[in-house]
Image: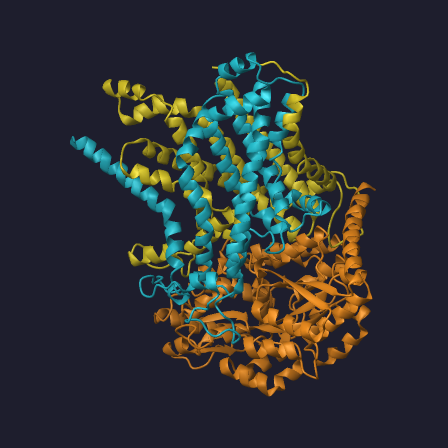
Amino acid sequence: MSPRHAVRSLLLNLAAIVLIIFVVGPFLWVAIASLQAENDLLHRPPSVIQHPTLDNYNYVFTGKIPSSYEVKGQLRSRITQEARMIAPALGNSFIVALSVLVINVLLGTPAAYTFSRLRFRARGAAYNFILGSRLMPAMAVAIPYYVIVQALGLLDTRISLVLVDCALTLPFTIWFLTLYINNVPRDMEEAGMVDGCTIPQALVRIVAPMMLPGLVATAAFAFMTSYNEFLFARFLTQSLRSQTGPVVIASIAGNPDASYSLISVCMTLGLIPPLILAIALRKRLTEGLSTSVTFR
Amino acid sequence: MPETRTRWYPYVTILPALLLIGLFTLYPVAVAIQDSFYQYVLTKPRSHPFIGLRNFREVIGSYYFLNSLSITGMFTVASVAGVFLFGLTVASLLNTKIKLAAVLKVIILLPWAIPSVVAGLLWKWILNGDFGILNGILFSLKLIPGYIPFLSDPVLARVSLVLAQVWKEGSLAAIFFLAGLQLIPSELYEAARMDGCRTWRMFRAITFPLLRPIALVVLVYETMTSILTFDLIYVLTGGGPADSTSLISWFAYAEIFKSLNLGHGIALSIIIALLTLALILAYLRILRTEDSR
Amino acid sequence: MKIRQGLFWKVFLVVFLVLGTAVVSTAAADVNMSFVVWSYGLETVQDNIQKFQAMNPGVTIALKDYSWLDYHDTIVGRFAAGNFPDLMYGSDHWLQEWASAGWLVPLDKYFPQVKQYSPELAPYALQGMSYNGEIYGMSYYADTLDFIYNAKQLQAAGFTAGPRTLDELFKMASALKSKGVVQYPIILAWSQKEGAFPEAFLSLVFAQQKGGNAMFDSSMEPVFNRPNSAAAQVLEWVRKAYSAGLIDPVSLSTAEIDQIKSMQAGAHTFTIAPQYNMAELNRPKSGDFAGQFKIALMPGVSHATVGYVRFYAMTSAVPKKGKDYLDAAWKFFEYFAGKTNGQYTVVKRWAVENGLGFAQLPLFNDPDVRSAFGKWGDITTIAEQAKLARAKEGLTPWYGTWDIFMRAEVQKVILGQESAAAALSAMASKWNELKAQQ
């Protein structure tokens, strides 16, 4: 390798290392902190090598109070039962996000196909309406959202979150898929229709397989957005029946009875499901996004 | 163009989505707009006179409006620029053949995967001036003489806010840019290199122009996100210190939840929505003129 | 009036749903009440609920908690959307807001017997629970903002007792800093978001003033902006101490939980915090300096301080549900904040187990309380400080709005962006503006 190449390679690697540290640093910290006792974390600087312990994880899953904490009932403890809610809350998050994913694909795809391929009256108006629905800041509409959900009798249910999250994600899904379908070549469908395919059949049998990467991308986006949604999740839920991960984590983080180690445990656990999804889908993601944004 | 077999097919396919979106848009926005023309203060439940545009006038003339708009403007410019640069850098690196690119490709998705509330809490802890890990590391490495109060100094607090925003949003930009970069034929670069082009010139002449459409999409999305930033401020700084990080959406929140003045809060939200819309239309206009070239 | 109709339908819907469920539940002769709290000692709260339910079969309490930092905003959101809880925690600085909005209802209107408890309450507590001459709550916890110091660190700098005046505090802090005992001797929980920021600031102002009306006069006109007022002196002093590096800059973004953890880790020597934190600070093995923390009377001229009260309150939803609910509510109040078999059972439990202060004066003489407090604090000083405590001034329905403005102004002074006089003047103008709008 020529010297100039070597230098260039070194610089690039350095830049990559800096970026990797910046991106992954906070996650590493949270994971490490979840294994410490809080007193160690409060030192200046925090001491992380001295006494690692799995006690906090144990508590969340089995309820066994770490030995380093005082017996409950005697003055403020560093442990709170709220932390044990993280597992069911994550379960709720997962179910809601999955449902939002499915609905986005099922409702968004036909709509996107229609916007992309077909010409009809009110097409422009409907399209712009859908895109413009996301402009209003959330807090202005939080109370009306509440009234709607309550009128439907869906307070403190996962269904309410699914509905709201779909309303939040469908606009982007439809916009994105429309652009994507614009790039899928039409000859196959046209051939199919000449042979007698109806539009729905064409959509399912011919177009959908060709747009798989795009579908996967929107599925991932819908899942992530729903999984991460916090404002409405907190406002519309009241109990573990429907509370999601972010709500519980945020609540624990503000709980004076929760040590920083316990908070870290909950944050770390909350990272796992989306992490798995992100890693599994990373290849599809770039494939899907690339085609739609470069063309009109 | 395939024939429309049945007249109603298009409407049927878009109806479910339209209904769902409409349910959560039409009624809330209609109520919001209506409420903005009335006095609606929760501590005075019996008084609801119609006051026309007075809520809007009071909000625009309030002590926080101009100051907070300028802070929001600064923040938006800084974070959009930061996200832009971050995304472009990461995408360029991922486009090279170095081995670390594979690692970067996996982890770049991680910040996208956590709620902004949790991201805010995490950064708040990391930047903590008493026992934050960043201070801990810098101090142990003897890079700083004492702990830095990142979130208690007006300038540093704003920088921290931008930092957290770039960290959170940068992944999305990086992915967009990576997609764009991969569509540029490598032959263009080969040819330029054989002509003796240096890296920077190649970037300016080849990469940048071809990335422009994506750059504009990133600009639009990130500008919207920045103006509407709320979760991050709420958790990281609460608007402080001394209102130095009170972005405009923070005051929309404060009007409703601290002052209990729904009329003001909704009027302010409408103003924000209109400003955002104006910006987006401006971007799109630029995009269209670019297109027609 | 379209808005009235809209509101009417919302209220109708709420009442309809509520009555609907009430019909179903009264058919079963069971009372189910919701109880909203902020997250503190939840296990103890749950246990108290269990005991209450055992004593009152047919009544169930459904507990819901929110983080203290979000409590006010979350509750406002709930009320605004029509999602009223039945029973809840309240605080004196929100009472005016929530009572004028019609969300909380006066207890003495439905339970005249509540007045029997009034003579045994500390005056600042009773004042904090009253609005328009009516009593809106029964207290389970009342406390004072106390001046806490790390005696061991102070000794290392050569001092044996806490500071009596602000000047002394400045001298001691300077000595601690120059001798290298701590980098920043003083920490305060004065984050723009922190609930107790105004209370801590006011406690210094009260201590600096002899007598009442430190901030407002009897017709709620501002007096803090007069030249050389107590508030002006305190602001100048804080500004001076901050510039001299005696107050940790971090204070402007610190909230109570981190403040206490920081003290526990020995990072600072002096702080102002609610008294109940002494139990945590001096809990054995809680930190390097456990057992070394002491209270001094608030440094200043009069050593007065702010006393605040937290209480159980009843929302307007309960009377609408009928007599069964009202009866159950009174039983709740009596068990959780009143006397059972002649003892303030629950209040005493909080005092003995968690070191929480209390509004019920007889408890100061209770042997169990005295012995428990003796473990982590000096009950004589605590009682003395409580005698000098006064309720916050300026509690009005618009206090919340003024509060967010005032905090930013105080922080601007500390950061040197504004002079104390200018800030106080701006705060007075804002107050007058809000007052005129009522």
Q: Nearer the viewer, residue C258 or A220?
A: A220
Is C191 placed left or right of A133 in the picture?
left
Residue drawn at (70%, 77%), measured in percent from left and top? C338
- The chain whose colour is cyan is A
Q: Nearer the viewer, residue C300 or C341?
A: C341
Is C290 placed left or right of B49 in the picture?
left
Q: Does residue C124 sit above or below A2 in this rendering? A: below
The image shows residue A196 at horizontal and vertical percentages of 58, 14
- The chain whose colour is yellow is B
Residue drawn at (53%, 69%), measured in percent from left and top? C273
Q: Does residue A285 sit above or below B118 in this rendering? A: above
Residue drawn at (53%, 57%), measured in percent from left and top? C411
Q: Nearer the viewer, residue A151 or C215?
A: A151
Q: Does residue B64 sit above or below C109 in this rendering? A: above
Residue drawn at (53%, 51%), measured in percent from left and top? A91
Q: Quadrant of the N terminus of chain C?
A: top right
The image shows residue A128 at horizontal and vertical percentages of 62, 26
Is B47 placed left or right of B272 in the picture?
right
- The chain whose colour is orange is C
The image shows residue C26 at horizontal and vertical percentages of 79, 62
Q: How is the image coloured?
A: by chain
Is C300 placed left or right of A11 in the picture?
right
Q: Quadrant of the C terminus of chain C?
A: bottom right
